[in-house]
Image (spheres, rainbow, N blue to C red):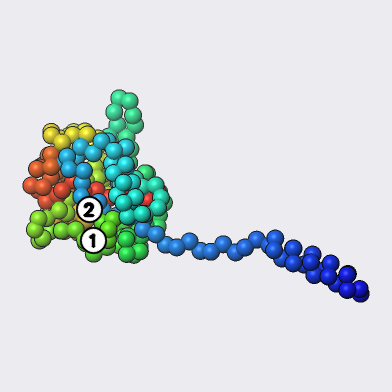
Amino acid sequence: MTKLRIFSLLTIAAVVGSCAPAEEEPMEPMMSFFLTSAGPGDGAALGGLDGADAYCQSLANSVEADGTWHAYLSAAATADAAAVNARDRIGTGPWLNRALVEVASDVANLHSENNNLTKETVLNERGGMTNGRGDTPNRHDILTGSNLDGTVAEGDGDTTCDNWTSSGEGSALVGHFDREGGGANPTSWNSAHPSSGCSQENLQGTGGAGLFYCFAV
């Protein structure tokens, strides 16, 4: 075989080899769940679901967390819109906290007794813990407007503070992120009891602060 022939074959092999698809590097795990470190400050008036989502997104952006973020909130049906279930607006999981600890593998696991939501794992967007029952001030009431299964809580009274637009009259179903306290379901992270009102003062007076959960979808 001539030197020219050998050179041509080597050149072809090099070109073919350079065109081979590169192996994709595995994606780095990222935070996909947090509890807001603070609420917007006007009680349960969050600007509706859109306003709550935008607030989640702003907190995520402030710590350079990628993705699209939604609030874990349900909304009641109105004359112009169907009801919205919190469980349907948070993606499919799995979800990791700021410490990259998995808190739930999927929607079913999240709404089961086998999830990993505890005072120690429900971290805020900066990785900090939140005051729970027994701390001063207690901030364990988390706005959800939801039943245990993540569907909108419907009844005779308001359960979503007028679909997250009221900071006055009304009420919202709240969960206990630390899984302690009173109410019909005291150990529930998403559906422990109704709030006594929708204002910042009302929420703080019964152990809350207008906080809510955020999920990357």
176, 135: nearer the viewer: 135
Pointer 2 residue: 37
Q: As rendered, which of 143 and 127 lies closer to the eye?
A: 127
Q: Is residue 191 visible?
A: no
* Image side of residue 80 versus residue 29, left or right: left
Residue 54 rendering spot, x and y as whole percentages: 32, 41
Q: Is residue 82 left or right of residue 7?
A: left
Q: At x 24% / y 45%, what residue is drawn?
A: 144
Q: Tell me the SS state at disc 2.
A: loop
Q: Is residue 11 left or right of residue 46?
A: right
Q: Which dot marks residue 16?
A: none
Q: Position of residue 8 (x, y in %)?
A: 84, 67
The residue depicted at 8 percent of the width and 47 percent of the height is: 205
> Disc 1 designates what residue?
128
2 or 1: tag closer to the N-terminus: 2
**Residue 27 percent across, percent down from the top left:** 48, 61
Q: What is the C-alpha distance between the residues marked 2 and 1?
A: 8 Å
Residue at position x 28%, y 55% from top?
125
Look at the picture and state if 125 lies above or below 47: below
Q: Residue 136: name its quadrant.
A: bottom left
For residue 45, above or below residue 133: above
Q: Are marks 2 and 1 in contact (CB under 8 Å)?
A: yes
Q: Residues within 10 Å of mark 1 (few under 14, many from 20)?
A: some
Q: Is residue 142 above or below residue 21?
A: above
Residue 49, image x, y percentages? 30, 38
Count of picture labels: 2
Q: Amino acid at mark 1?
A: Gly
* Res. 195 image quadrant: top left
Which secondary structure, mark 1?
Answer: loop
Three-letter residue code for mark 2? Ser
Q: Quadrant of the N terminus?
A: bottom right
- The part of the image, by quadrant, that contains residue 196 is top left
